[in-house]
Image (cartoon, coloured by chain):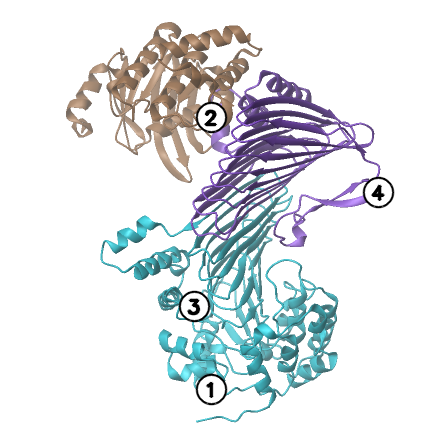
């Protein structure tokens, strides 16, 4: 049963999705479309407090000043004009189920996504009952003292001052062009506050916050874990998220207070037309710990480097990640850490897989400042090449400014061992199964850090990628 | 006045990473004596060796260590070494970039406080290596890098013979060695006793290394303390009946 | 006075790190060109050449061309001492099955700047062995690029350094694997004292078609000064499935276990640090296998310390 198409320009957007190769953009054309007037209207429609309205306009200014980065994957195909259109207020960018690309629908089928959820994931139509589920989760965590609400609501009401104090202070609009863009047009996202000493017993999942409007493209996540508290937050899901406009410039700011612990898990599987330029950063105080668990599967182009600032003494960071770049994908992922306090430690363990012409780049930065005495850092990255059409690049960098530090780094790249394949086949597996199993095993650094249902989803995703059934 | 004992360990408590391993250990070793320390795995034998040597990862939380009557409990590692304490490591470390020869020469220079005449040093080194059936080429190789287990142990004994300590602690020196290597190492230890008359504390749970040696005393450790002291006969008793026989 | 960009990283990364390239003031126009040295070995022949290059005047540059014909074996000892600003370019053409051994002693006087550029292309089964010792008190910028074109060609590169005072040691090394069964092994080890600043960029690039190739890179940096800065950028770029690449880096001060070992032999921390600071360079000096160069290096080292 067809829902109404709201505007004719939806057809333009559809075409551009399929014809993305024919669209040529250069830096200048990117500026078009996003005017102060649009941002102003957006702000009014959202009922922003005055400070936020001004903030957005300032961010827009910075966006126009900053150049496109001169390193990393090319973002030529970015459809900035339509993004400008997309963020226009009063947009009911509802698509028609018929317009959703077949490969996306096939993936839903293969991953066993319930019918009712498919539409919301595809940015089609109204919510079914994810709103209901969301409310249930919200109430149950409130019982433990945790505040979990959407960002827009958080701007007003009880936590308005807290939000104002922290919003885009960690990732500022000056950081890079897409942080500035985010600052100007952000919409949706979650605000979480865990009070002192509270340990939330269940992982909090952002999945429930998806909605058709904006479908999380410019969502802002702000999490504050107060002293001695702990939280496990899970963002994303393995089902592909499809959007008509192809940029995801989200922002995640995490504040881990003294003695607190935050685990931030993500499985990202944006559809294969998307440019995923997400910026995530954590600030860790004395004795605090941030753990990142990250599985990057989708997007046409992805740039993801969760960054941790180890400000307090004895603060810690752990990053566990896996990236799978298949046909037509260029995923540039990694992590960054800055050691500032004393006796801080950082650990990175990443695996990356490239297949069918995919390009996977591991990019990291470990900076140890002069005063960060007693710093320890260990980075281990492994890359698996599944054929010779693909690429796998490792670009790590270390900048160490104190002698009182112990820094280790190791990286390995290679192909699936033929002996391993032979061994599995000698036990009855087909070559395809053997290779899929080996790759799943290769990604176990992440899957064993995820709650079971996510790990299972992730492994299903890997299996599908290996069969070449997606995109 | 020389004290009666070369080494006295009095009521020693030692912790590693907040866990107490030695719970008030007592031990005395006289001048020119060979002692054997035995005990089941995990009982703290190596810990005692490290504590006497002064490894900072092992914290003394009670008791004393006296060397030639002097309290060395707070003395740093290199000072203890200069006073004549030597540890032959169970798993000698690889030190790329520093040759075996340069390492030993440097240690000797620290001990005597003056530069050695190269010719004299090389001669002595060469002779000692021959005694241990060590190929001369090892002298110019990076310390322990790529050495087999046996060669690493020989390198430790070589260092012992060149440095001539008053007390040499051998931590499982014969473990992992083949028959020939054990023979060579035993010979090296015997030579040490004969030439230097230094004392030995041999930590072992096999006893092949003792075959060529005259043992003056034996001690058995259990749960971080010495539970039995005896003469050479104690070694045989343990070998025949195991540690359980002590109960 | 121009500003040139040297030691460029094959793939750019975050600009904030300051590792993509180095901007260096250099007066190209004022540079005096010294006589070119051409070293050629005929097929199956052997050549050993000793070169000593000192700059002339404020800016000078020298070019050395090494042509190793099929099956030949060439050893070149280059003693490069910069008094002011000196650029030395050494290009190597390594023929079928030929071997070229290049030993470079890069030294600079205080306030002098040495730019060292090395490039080499290897045909089938050709190999290059590079040994570089960075001494002196002035700044050294060294950029080495190798192309393993022919199947079975190989490169080994060993670099040792001791940075002191406010010295800048800026290194770049790139190995492009094109042929099948090509191999590279890179080892950069050294120590930094006082307020020395060092950056090492090492890139192993497996091009499509370089199947059955292997590349490994190892870096060890001993940090001994209170104000030292160390930047390490070990890149592996890969477009070929059947290769094996790895790199490792260890940065820090004298580790506890090693320190304990030295102390247990009566050697205190200070002495141990001095021994280890010299270690990488002494090891390379021995590896050269030539008394004259070995002595030059050890003397140079003794002068420094």
Whether the residues at callouts 4 and 1 have beta carbons within 8 Å, the answer is: no
Spatial distance from mark 1 to mark 2, Cα to Cα? Answer: 71 Å
Q: Which residue is mark 2?
A: C261
**Disc 3 with disc 2 on a shared chain:** no
What subunit carries mark 3? A
What subunit carries mark 4? C
Q: As displayed, is residue A4 above or below residue A363? A: below
**Disc 4 with disc 2 on a shared chain:** yes
**Foreground tag (4 vs 2):** 4
**Foreground tag (3 vs 4):** 4
Q: Quadrant of the C terminus of chain B?
A: top left
Q: Helix or strand or loop: what does disc 1 sit on?
A: helix
Q: Which residue is mark 3?
A: A203
Q: As displayed, is residue A45 above or below residue C78? A: below
Residue C232 at x, y percent in the picture: 59, 43
Q: Which residue is mark 1?
A: A97
Q: Nearer the viewer, residue A232 or C230?
A: C230
Q: Which residue is mark 4?
A: C1
Residue A91 at x, y percent in the picture: 61, 86
What hue does chain C carry in this figure? purple
Which corner quadrant of the image does residue C105 belong to? top right
Q: Helix or strand or loop: what does disc 4 sit on?
A: loop
- Dot 4 or dot 2: first in sequence order is 4
What hue does chain B carry in this figure? brown
**Foreground tag (1 vs 2):** 1
Whether the residues at callouts 4 and 2 have beta carbons within 8 Å, the answer is: no
Whether the residues at callouts 3 and 2 have beta carbons within 8 Å, the answer is: no
* Mark 4 closeness class: few <14, some 14–19, many ≥20 residues within 10 Å: few
């Amino acid at each position: 049963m067809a829902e109404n198409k709201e505007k004719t320009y939806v057809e333009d957007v559809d075409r551009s999705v399929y014809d993305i190769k024919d669209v040529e953009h250069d830096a200048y054309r990117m500026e078009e479309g996003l005017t102060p007037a649009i941002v102003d209207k957006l702000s009014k429609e959202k009922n922003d407090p005055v400070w936020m309205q001004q903030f957005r306009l300032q961010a827009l200014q910075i966006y126009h000043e900053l150049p496109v980065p001169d390193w990393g994957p090319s973002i030529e195909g970015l459809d900035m004009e339509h993004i400008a259109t997309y963020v226009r207020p009063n947009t009911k960018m509802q698509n028609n189920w018929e317009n959703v690309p077949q490969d996306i629908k096939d993936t839903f089928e293969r991953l066993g996504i319930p019918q009712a959820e498919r539409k919301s994931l595809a940015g089609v139509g109204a919510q079914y009952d994810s709103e209901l589920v969301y409310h249930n989760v919200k109430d149950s965590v409130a019982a433990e003292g945790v505040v979990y609400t959407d960002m827009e609501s958080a701007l007003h009401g009880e936590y308005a001052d807290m939000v104002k104090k922290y919003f885009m202070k960690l990732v500022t609009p000056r950081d890079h062009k897409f942080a500035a863009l985010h600052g100007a047009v952000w919409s949706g996202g979650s605000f979480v506050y865990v009070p002192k000493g509270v340990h939330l017993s269940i992982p909090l999942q952002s999945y429930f916050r998806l909605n058709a409007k904006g479908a999380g493209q410019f969502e802002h996540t702000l999490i504050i874990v107060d002293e001695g508290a702990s939280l496990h937050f899970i963002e994303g899901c393995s089902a592909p998220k499809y959007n008509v406009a192809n940029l995801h410039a989200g922002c995640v700011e995490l504040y881990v207070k003294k003695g607190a612990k935050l685990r931030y898990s993500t499985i990202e599987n944006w559809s294969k037309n998307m440019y995923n330029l997400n910026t995530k950063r954590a600030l860790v105080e004395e004795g605090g710990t941030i753990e990142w668990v990250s599985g990057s599967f989708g997007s046409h182009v992805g740039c993801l480097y969760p960054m941790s600032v180890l400000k307090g003494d004895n603060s810690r960071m752990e990053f566990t990640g896996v990236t799978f770049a298949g046909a037509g994908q260029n995923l540039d992922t990694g992590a960054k850490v800055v050691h500032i306090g004393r006796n801080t430690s950082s650990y990175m363990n990443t695996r990356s897989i490239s297949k069918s012409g995919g390009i996977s780049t591991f990019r990291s930065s470990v900076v140890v400042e002069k005063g960060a005495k007693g710093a320890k850092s260990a980075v281990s990255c492994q890359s698996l090449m599944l054929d010779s059409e693909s690429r796998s690049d490792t670009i790590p960098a270390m900048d160490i400014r104190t002698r009182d530090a112990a820094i280790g780094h190791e990286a390995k790249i290679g192909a699936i061992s033929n002996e391993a394949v032979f061994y599995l086949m000698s036990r009855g597996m087909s070559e395809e199964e053997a290779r899929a199993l080996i790759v799943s095993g290769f990604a176990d650094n992440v899957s064993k850090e995820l709650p079971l249902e996510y790990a299972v989803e992730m492994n299903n995703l890997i299996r599908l990628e290996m069969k070449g059934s997606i995109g | 006045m020389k004290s009666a004992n070369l080494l006295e360990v009095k009521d020693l408590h030692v912790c590693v990473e907040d866990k107490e391993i030695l719970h008030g250990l007592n031990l005395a070793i006289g001048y020119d004596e060979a002692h054997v320390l035995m005990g089941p795995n995990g009982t703290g034998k190596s810990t005692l060796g490290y504590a006497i040597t002064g490894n900072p990862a092992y914290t003394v939380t009670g008791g004393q260590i006296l060397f030639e009557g002097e309290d060395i409990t707070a003395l740093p590692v290199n000072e203890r070494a200069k006073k004549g304490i030597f540890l032959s490591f169970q798993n000698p470390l690889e030190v790329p970039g520093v040759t075996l020869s340069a390492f030993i020469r440097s240690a000797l220079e620290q001990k005597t406080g003056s530069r050695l005449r190269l010719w004299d040093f090389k001669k002595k080194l060469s002779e000692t290596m021959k005694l241990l059936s060590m190929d001369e080429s090892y002298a110019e190789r990076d310390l322990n890098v790529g050495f087999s287990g046996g060669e690493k142990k020989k390198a430790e004994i070589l260092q012992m013979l060149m440095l001539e300590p008053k007390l040499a602690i051998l931590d499982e020196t014969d473990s992992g060695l083949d028959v020939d290597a054990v023979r060579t190492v035993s010979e090296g230890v015997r030579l040490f006793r004969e030439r230097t008359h230094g004392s030995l504390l041999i930590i072992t749970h096999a006893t092949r290394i003792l075959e060529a040696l005259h043992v003056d005393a034996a001690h058995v450790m259990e749960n971080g303390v010495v539970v039995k002291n005896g003469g050479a006969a104690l070694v045989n008793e343990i070998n025949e009946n195991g540690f359980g026989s002590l109960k | 006075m121009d500003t040139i960009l040297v030691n460029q990283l094959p793939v750019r990364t975050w600009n904030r790190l300051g590792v993509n390239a180095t901007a260096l003031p250099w007066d190209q126009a004022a540079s005096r060109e010294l006589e070119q040295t051409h070293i050629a070995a005929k097929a199956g022949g052997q050549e050993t050449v000793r070169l000593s290059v000192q700059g002339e005047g404020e800016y000078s540059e020298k070019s050395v061309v090494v042509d190793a014909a099929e099956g030949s074996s060439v050893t070149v000892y280059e003693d490069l001492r910069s008094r002011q600003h000196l650029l030395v370019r050494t290009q190597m053409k390594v023929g079928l099955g030929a071997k070229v051994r290049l030993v470079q002693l890069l030294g600079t006087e205080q306030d002098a700047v040495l730019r060292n550029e090395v490039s080499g292309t290897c045909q089938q089964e050709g190999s290059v062995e590079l040994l570089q010792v960075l001494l002196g008190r002035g700044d050294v910028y060294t950029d080495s690029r190798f192309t393993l074109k022919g199947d079975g060609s190989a490169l080994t590169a060993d670099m040792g350094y001791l940075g002191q005072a406010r010295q800048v040691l800026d290194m770049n090394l790139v190995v492009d694997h094109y042929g099948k069964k090509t191999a590279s092994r890179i080892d950069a080890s050294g120590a930094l004292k006082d307020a020395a600043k060092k950056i090492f960029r090492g890139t192993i690039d497996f091009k499509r078609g370089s199947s059955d190739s292997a590349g490994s890179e190892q870096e060890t940096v001993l940090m001994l000064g209170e104000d030292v800065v160390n930047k390490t950028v070990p890149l592996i770029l890969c477009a070929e499935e059947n290769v094996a690449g790895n790199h490792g880096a260890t940065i820090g001060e004298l580790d506890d276990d090693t320190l304990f070992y030295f102390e247990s032999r009566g050697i205190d921390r200070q002495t141990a640090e001095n021994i280890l600071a010299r270690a990488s360079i002494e090891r390379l000096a021995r590896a050269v296998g030539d008394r004259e160069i070995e002595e030059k290096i050890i003397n140079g080292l003794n002068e420094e310390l």
